[in-house]
């Protein structure tokens, strides 16, 4: 998508701070200088990382290549450690008390700490990009109980210098009344709930002229919905954040992808592995946060995205990603057994000729057929039969299931991040 096809860049779209317009080389040097310090801190203060990174010399992790040698911790592992060990699974660097004023819970149940930093979740940057400015009132319709979303947005708004009406969820007519009487500058919450509020206001015959901007999260925000809000006089922007990591990336008025936050180091890796993919290829978003309270190192979000080339037209020099492109966990049950993306990666690793691989599960339920499609341009016609047999044997060795092998043309597999495609018909 291009800026000329959407809302124009605002004249007041100044950067939030100097970090956003740093020379990219300086930013990378700053991040790589902070990285070994954060890793050493995690090893010393978070018992889980003392175990996971045992024997790692933190002082040597000063590049992305070195970072890529460390293990990826995925959400299901965090959940398993929380259930087996202690609250936070040993990943928190602080305990209950003054250093941790709040604790939240996400589905799973996974518990997350909130530290004492002024903008702990780093949301003010995204709000600024969405047009919110000091001295304004924000209507916050994210939940304030159990999950951290409400607090994430409120602490960010306070750091930006805004007041907050904690609307929370539900009670649509009361939400309309509060907006009509308090006249907030804008809304923060899910796009679907603001749509419900605006439709209810129209039904009630109530005008909400003050609500001209919004920052959305928690749901997809397709162009069709963006255009619907614009028709109602509301310029909506999306942010990408999680309860574990806080802000990861945010949309700007250029509307060309999402700009990465300044407090995280983001990698895009092949699903099921920790191996970075080439720029532009879709893969799993893996994040190392510089948050000292909850120092997650190479945390796999399970979300798919890809890096966009070039800088943001707004002048922000940080890397951009395409936004949320689906889920990386494509575990599929075949003939009663689970097949994981990591198993596909293990098969591919055994054959250096394989550039990319995709396991396609087809047929009807109870009559499954697996075909491993591989891009392997170095395999000659004369050796292909024997080589295909070796790959087929590896499929059975790794998955304990029989599978066919299909050598396809280089570059023919879709760039959608899928390692396992479930193409079965369900009757």
Image: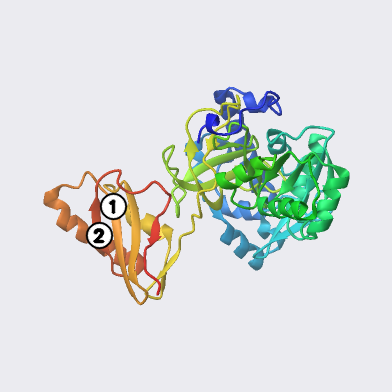
Which of the marked residues, 2 or 1, is nearer the chain's N terminus? Answer: 1
- Furthest-left residue in view? 382
Asked whether residue 320 is in view, the answer is yes
Count of numbered circles on the image:
2
The residue at 58%/22% (across/down) is 23
- Alpha carbon distance from label 2 to label 1: 7 Å
Closer to the camera, 335 or 274? 335
Residue ID at (85%, 33%): 135
Q: Secondary structure at mark 2?
A: strand
Q: In the picture shown, does residue 29 fall above or below 87?
A: above
Q: Are marks 2 and 1 in contact (CB under 8 Å)?
A: yes
Q: Which residue is mark 2?
A: 405
Q: Which residue is under mark 1? A: 374
In the image, what residue occupies the spot 79% across and 44% down?
208
Q: Which of the 4 quarters of the picture holds residue 90?
A: bottom right
Looking at the image, can residue 222 be seen? no
Compare residues 43 and 404 and report the one nearer the observer. 404
Q: Residue furthest right?
A: 181
Q: Is residue 382 left or right of residue 155?
A: left
Residue at screen point 22% across, 59% down: 390
């Amino acid at each position: 998508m291009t800026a000329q096809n959407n809302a124009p860049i605002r004249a007041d779209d100044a950067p939030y701070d100097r970090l956003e317009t740093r020379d990219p080389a300086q930013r990378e040097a700053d991040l790589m200088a902070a990285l070994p310090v954060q890793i050493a801190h995690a090893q010393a203060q978070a018992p889980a990382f003392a175990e996971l990174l045992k024997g790692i010399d933190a002082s040597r992790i000063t590049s992305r290549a070195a970072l890529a040698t460390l293990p990826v911790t995925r959400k299901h592992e965090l959940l398993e450690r929380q259930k087996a060990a202690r609250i936070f699974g040993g990943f928190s660097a602080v305990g209950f008390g003054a250093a941790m004023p709040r604790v939240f819970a996400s589905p799973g149940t996974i518990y997350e700490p909130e530290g004492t930093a002024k903008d702990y979740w780093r949301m003010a940057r995204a709000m600024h990009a969405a047009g919110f400015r000091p001295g304004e009132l924000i209507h916050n319709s994210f939940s304030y109980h159990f999950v951290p979303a409400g607090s994430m947005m409120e602490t960010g708004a306070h750091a930006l210098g805004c007041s907050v009406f904690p609307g929370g969820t539900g009670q649509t007519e009361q939400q309309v009344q509060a907006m009509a009487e308090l006249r907030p500058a804008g809304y923060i919450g899910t796009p679907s709930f603001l749509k419900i509020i605006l439709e209810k206001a129209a039904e009630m015959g109530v005008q909400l002229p003050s609500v001209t901007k919004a920052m959305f999260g928690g749901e997809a925000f397709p162009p069709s919905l963006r255009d619907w809000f614009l028709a109602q006089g509301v310029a909506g922007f999306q942010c990408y954040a999680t309860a574990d990591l806080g802000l990861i990336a945010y949309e700007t008025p250029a509307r060309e992808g999402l700009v990465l936050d300044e407090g995280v180091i983001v990698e895009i890796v092949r699903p099921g592995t920790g191996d970075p993919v080439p720029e532009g290829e879709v893969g799993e978003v893996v994040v190392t946060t510089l948050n000292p309270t909850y120092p997650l190192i190479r945390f796999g979000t399970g979300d798919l995205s890809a890096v966009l080339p070039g800088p943001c037209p707004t002048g922000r020099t940080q890397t951009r990603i395409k936004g949320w492109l689906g889920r990386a966990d494509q575990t599929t049950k075949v003939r009663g057994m689970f097949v994981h993306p990591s198993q596909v990666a293990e098969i591919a690793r055994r054959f250096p000729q394989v550039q990319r691989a995709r396991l396609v599960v087809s047929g009807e339920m109870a009559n499954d057929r697996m075909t491993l499609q591989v891009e392997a341009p170095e395999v000659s016609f004369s050796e292909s039969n024997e080589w295909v047999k070796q790959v087929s044997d590896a499929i059975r060795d790794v998955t304990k299931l029989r599978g066919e092998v299909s050598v396809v043309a280089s570059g023919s597999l879709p760039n959608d991040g899928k390692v396992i495609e479930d193409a079965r018909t369900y009757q």
